[in-house]
Image (spheres, rainbow, N blue to C red):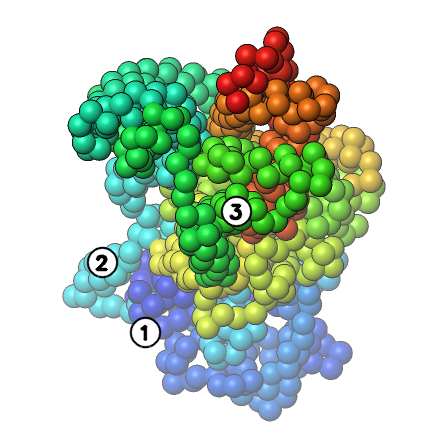
Amino acid sequence: ENEEDDAIDLRTDRIFLDAQTLKAANGPLTALTYIANNLHHGTNATPYSMITGVSSNFLGHITPTGDNMVITEWLANDLQVKSGDQITVDYYVLGLNRQLEERPHTFTVSGILDTEQPGWRELMPNFPGIVDRDNLRDWNPGIDFDSGRVRDQDEDYWKKHRGTPKAFIALETGQKLWANRYGEATTMRFRFNATNRNEIKAAIREKFDPAQIGLRFRDVRTEAVTGDSANDFGGLFIGLSFFLVLAALILMGLLFVFGVEQRAPQIGTLLAIGFTGKTVRNLLLAEGFVLALLGAGLGACAGLGYTRVLVDLLNSDWGGAIGKGNIIYEAQPQTIVYGMISGLAVALFTIWLTVRKLAQTQAITLIQGAPATTDTTRAGRKALLTAVVCAAGAIGLGLAMKDAQGQMKAGGFFGAGMLMLVSCLCVCHAWLGKMATGGGASFATLGAMGWRGSARRRGRSLACIGLLACGVFLLVAVGAFRLDPNDGAQERWSGTGGFAFFGQSDVPVLYDLNTEKGRDEMAVNGDVSLVQMRVREGDDASCLNLNQTREPRLLGVDPQQLIDREAFTFAKGEGWGLLNEPEDGAVPAVVDMNTGMWALHVKVGEVMDYPNEAGGTFPIRIVGFLANSMLQGDLIISEQNFVKQFPSASGYRAFLIDSDDPQATEEELSFALEDYGLELTPATRRLAEFSQVQNTYLDIFQALGGLALLLGSIGLGVVVLRNVLERRGELALLQAVGFRKGSLHWLVLAEHGGLLALGLVGGVVSALLAVAPSLTGPGQGLPVDLLKWIIGGILVSGIFWTWLASVAALRGRMLTALRSE
């Protein structure tokens, strides 16, 4: 309360009143007081004076306008000026990194007032290092101050008039010169009389929103409940497990068919004595139901055990997948029941498909044990048509999903891979049909004869190809997503950006450590090259946080520093220069692709609201995605836009540090910035922490793929053994006409080696389509080494099973088999 001027002054210890406060208070009189380093006219100069920009009617009937200046009588005498003379004012402007720039501005004297009037002294804000000093020479304003320039008359003025302004200019002019990110006025004055004093105070308090001074109220309970709705990876697990389930169903179907075919004479006898095909089919389904029920029960128990082991591993050795979280094992009875019913229904459907055709076969054919014949030409045409449709669908789905995000994109490309897998299997089906009718191969060599033999039992061969393709698909698809944080870690395009360390401090660093002056202020010895970033704390939006994120941490950076270094790789967007381009009023921002897709659920071009310091919000437009970077979890905007929204967030608390000698740099910075709470993390370690989450999930998925491949290998062995045992008589005949056992082994190997190759090619091609979007990011690419191991392992396994089956079939006396041929 300003009793000298019968007024109430609205001021702040922060010196400057921001625009939101001025708008809310809506006071009639506004002033902006600033420190002038020097006022000079000709050779006369007055150091360190207060100048105030005032609104209309602040000085009564005198109102300065434009570049006019009203001065006090004391200043007129000191500079020996009169109305119409010009006075040049030198003043400092504070830029980024606390850099001070001195600027001049010339005014024309338009009037002279008394040296001091009531209420003028209170116009000087509570400048630290000034307001409490008895002598002007003792000022410590925190900027360059030369006490030697202070004269005796300056000291006398300070003792008599304190911070009374020596000159007044128009408020609009003062704001153009001195307004900054902290505010655009220092005083708002309300004049009163005895009757409205309390009314003014009450009105001022009522107009203020606590959020305008950074006090925000949040519904933490609702946010906590919403945050608990973590990303649901159940769909992804089910999608990847689909290939395991499919492989298990194929193997189950094979085994059931083998059992039924072995009983073909019995089934034929039942049909011959009057049983209908439907009755026989129901009988076989009843037998299958018992087996499927037992299998579903055992599978449910095994599934519970597997899940419990998986949860324990996620809470211990595989804890990288859940960051700092913890998973609680909870098995709900309804889930178990639903799983058993689903598994039982799928198993019965598979059995029904296998027995439906058999029950329609002629009784005499079944009694003789001969395989049923089918129209291979027609079936081959249908298969080719289906292959074309599925391939077109796979390509179309891939093109449609190329601009999608998150789970939709991943699911879309996995769907495209599955369609391509079906297309490959249909091509194999058509090719086997052509081979069965005598086309596509000759009997010129044993190898060609073996190829023709693979078409003899087309269903078995196709099932064998499908089993292997499912396992290969899952292993290759999952392996392609594996991240290597050390891949090109020193290169600028990598996930580390080529930086050696990522640093974070508890206390802001107020100086630019890239300059010699900044290093001297912070006692940093030697040259240091780094990118400094301003920080507004927020929620952890990285993959280390399983919960959903509302307000991720915000970083403000000078884009030019990253442009000059060509740091990081953009998965979407045209580079760091986008942060400097206005986006229709929205602030441009860059975010790591995983953060944008999975945590924030945004895509490039979308706008999200973010709270600012003034209690409101401002729009942020996502203009680019970083590919697999160590900046995961943060929204990144330009430093210029950052200080506009958070003017009081001084200094830098995040650092990207270059170094040719990491150990020396770490020791130097840790010692110099010890009081600032600096924590340095090697860039590769930080990136590895994020990569570990994805790689751990991939370990889980690859375990499923390994199980699918194991089933495929078992299926291959079963098919090979069954085929060779059924053809034991044929092999005995070939041996009788002069073929050696070694040649017969080669015949069997050629027949089933083709199936092995087709399964490998179909699985690899389909998997590469499914993971195509992920092959271009840093730390990712075509998994050549993985492909070598998978192909080599399957070839060794296939050759082993084939060799073992042929040895089992050709051992012992072949005469008995020859007699039955």
Give coordinates of residue 134: x percent, y percent: 57, 50
Which numbered disc, 3 or 2, marks the residue closer to the eye? 3
- Nearer to us: label 1 or label 3: 3
- Contact between marks 3 and 2 (CB within 8 A): the answer is no
**Residue displayed at 64% across by 78% down:** 105
Asked if residue 366 can be seen in this view, the reply is yes
Task: Judge whether 71 appears above or below 427 on screen.
Answer: below
| Residue 206 image label | 2
Q: Quadrant of the N terminus?
A: bottom left
Residue 12 position by quadrant: bottom left
Q: Nearer the viewer, residue 663 or 718?
A: 718
Residue 153 visible in this rendered orientation of the protein: no
Name the residue nearer the viewer: 471 or 357.
Answer: 357
* Image point (67%, 40%), residue name: 443
Q: Is residue 461 left or right of residue 743?
A: left
- Tell me whether circle 1 and circle 3 mark residues in contact (CB < 8 Å): no
* Residue where numbered disc 3 is placed: 437
Label 2 residue SS: helix
Element at badge 1? loop
Asked where in the image residue 345 lies, by quadrant, the reply is top left
Residue at position x 48%, y 78% in the image: 172
Q: Which mark is residue 425?
A: none
> On the rendered structure, is 135 left or right of 606?
right
- CA separation in Å, label 3 and label 2: 92 Å
Q: Which numbered disc, 1 or 2, marks the residue closer to the eye?
A: 2
The amino acid sitting under disc 1 is Pro
The residue labelled by disc 1 is 28
Amino acid type, residue under disc 3 in the picture: Thr
Q: Label 2: how many residues lie within 10 Å, few (<14), some (14-19) or many (20+)? A: few
SS class of the residue under badge 3? loop
Q: Residues within 10 Å of mark 1 (few under 14, many from 20)?
A: few
Cα separation between marks 1 and 3: 99 Å
